[in-house]
Amino acid sequence: MKHAILFDLWQTLVRDTRERQAITVRQQLVADFLKAHNITPPENLADAFIAGGKRFFEVYETEQRTATLAERLHWIFQFCGYDFEDAELGDLMNQVAEAGLLLNPEPTPHVKEILRTLSRQYPLGVVSDTGFTPGRVLRKHLERHGLLQYISVFSFSDETGYAKPHSQSFMTVLNQLKVAPENAIHCGDLPKHDVIGAHNLGMTTVLYTGHHAVALDGIKPDYIISDWRELPALVDEVFS
């Protein structure tokens, strides 16, 4: 019988440390774009990003997908009273995406050694929702920290069109690995997205609280761990 272990990315495998710097850079990129179109950047540009972020999370929660970069930029410009064609935003979208390289997320404690250990026996996958930073950039971060080599398959929401807790977020990985949901474990930090999504498919759910505590609001993960060194024994128990 084949088994697999899946992981969320943000605040699970890695924790971000420079989100504010990346936002500042992205705001400057948008300001420079406007200047290049002979438009004086509005003073409320930061408010436009906040408004766009709120709309992003509305779509995230109601449609179980993450808005595209084009959508997010359109929302920002519309808030400021401007409108551009998609074709005009190509270079800006690439620049905004690449700004994600500034995030420099750090691996969570002990995660590298645990991935190395588990990958010797089980295929590992990542199921991650994305924001401004797309999967292609997130892979670079994983490679930079030596984590990419242990992960077989990825499901990034900007690539699949689905966000957790949508079943397809998880099934994208499980189908490629040819593993049934009941023979898989999913580890993540968000009860509403990681735990509920995986549980609905019949996966064993592990809530990771090593980076931050969360309110369960009645949601019941199968296991809760705060230290990755707890995971190998848990895996042995589940898959025995």
Image: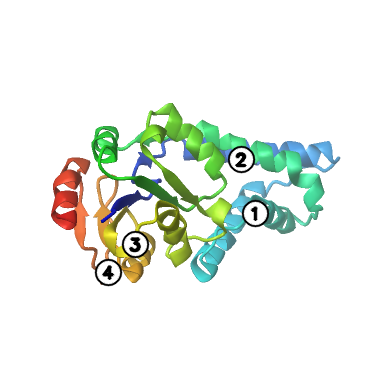
Q: In this view, does 103 lie above or below 76?
A: above
If you read the primary sequence from the N terminus, does the residue marked by circle 2 or circle 4 appear first? 2
If you read the primary sequence from the N terminus, does the residue marked by circle 4 or circle 1 appear first? 1
Helix, strand or loop status at disc 3: loop
Q: How crowded is mark 2: few (under 14 residues within 10 Å), some or many (20 or more)?
A: some
Amino acid bearing label 4: Ile
For the residue pair 46 and 1, the one nearer the viewer reads as: 1
- Picture quarter with the C terminus: bottom left
Left or right of 81 on screen, residue 113:
left
Question: Which quadrant of the view contains residue 122?
Answer: top left
If you read the primary sequence from the N terminus, does the residue marked by circle 1 or circle 2 appear first? 1
Identity of the residue furthest to the right in this view: 38
For the residue pair 35 and 110, the one nearer the viewer reads as: 110
Mark 3 to mark 2: distance in Å? 34 Å
Q: Please tell me whether mark 4 or mark 1 is closer to you in this view.
A: 4
Q: How crowded is mark 1: few (under 14 residues within 10 Å), some or many (20 or more)?
A: many
Residue hosting label 1: 72
Q: In this view, does 144 lie above or below 8?
A: above
Residue hosting label 4: 219
- Percent x, y for residue 179? 35, 57
Q: Which residue is drawn at 37% across and 40% down?
A: 15
Mark 4 to mark 1: distance in Å? 31 Å
If you read the primary sequence from the N terminus, does the residue marked by circle 3 or circle 1 appear first? 1
Residue hosting label 3: 180
Question: Which quadrant of the view contains residue 200?
Answer: bottom left
